[in-house]
Amino acid sequence: MTRYPMLDYFFGGYMHQDWRSDYPDEWAALDHFIRSEPEGSGAGFCKEVAELLATAPSEAELRRLLLEDFGAAAMVENRGWKYRDWIQAMSDHVAKATDHPQAS
């Protein structure tokens, strides 16, 4: 069992190898996740992102976790993102869409 089940579920299930066939971008994948999964999934996603980032993994370790452990197929550095900033932006997107207290 993973320490981050919601992140594992989202990245492996929504941001998998063929995700670009299903969604135009990661924000559409997140919106589908928010609409499709049980209530509380968004809050779980935000909580796990906060916990993950609090462990302060290096950029290389965060990249490895997302791509190898969680199964995300998103080479965000090719689009000018750092993985830390990208996953935080995703958490912020979920928080705003779900009225989670983390929303800024």
Image (cartoon, helix red, strand yellow):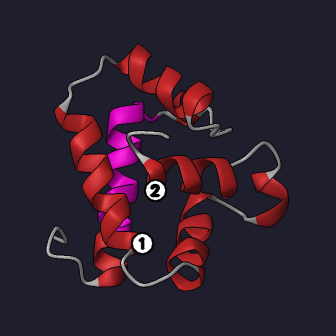
Disc 1 secondary structure class: helix
Residue at (37%, 67%) from the top-left corner? 93
User: Across the whole image, how many numbered discs are drawn on residues?
Assistant: 2
Check whether the beta carbons of the residues at disc 2 and disc 1 lie within 8 A of each other: yes
**Hey, which quadrant is residue 85 in on the image?**
top left
Query: Where in the figure is residue 18, as x and y percent of width and height?
Result: 83, 49
Report if residue 88 lies within the magenta region: yes
Say which residue label 1 marks.
Answer: 41
Please state the horizontal and vertical placement of residue 10, each as a whole percent of the image: 56, 56
Extent of the magenta region: 81-94
Q: Which mark is residue 6?
A: 2
Q: Nearer the viewer, residue 76 or 63?
A: 63
Q: Residue at x 50, y 77 (%)?
A: 34
Residue 31 to residue 11: above or below: below
Q: Tell whether 43 sits left or right of 75.
A: left
Q: Residue at x 62, y 40 (%)?
A: 72
Amino acid on which disc 2 is placed: Met
Is residue 8 something one can see in this rendering?
yes
Instruction: Reply yes or no: does residue 43 show up in magenta.
Output: no
State the residue at coordinates (30%, 70%).
43
Query: In the rendered view, would you say 36 is above or below 79?
Result: below
Q: Is residue 64 above or below residue 2?
A: above
Q: Main secondary structure of the magenta part?
A: helix
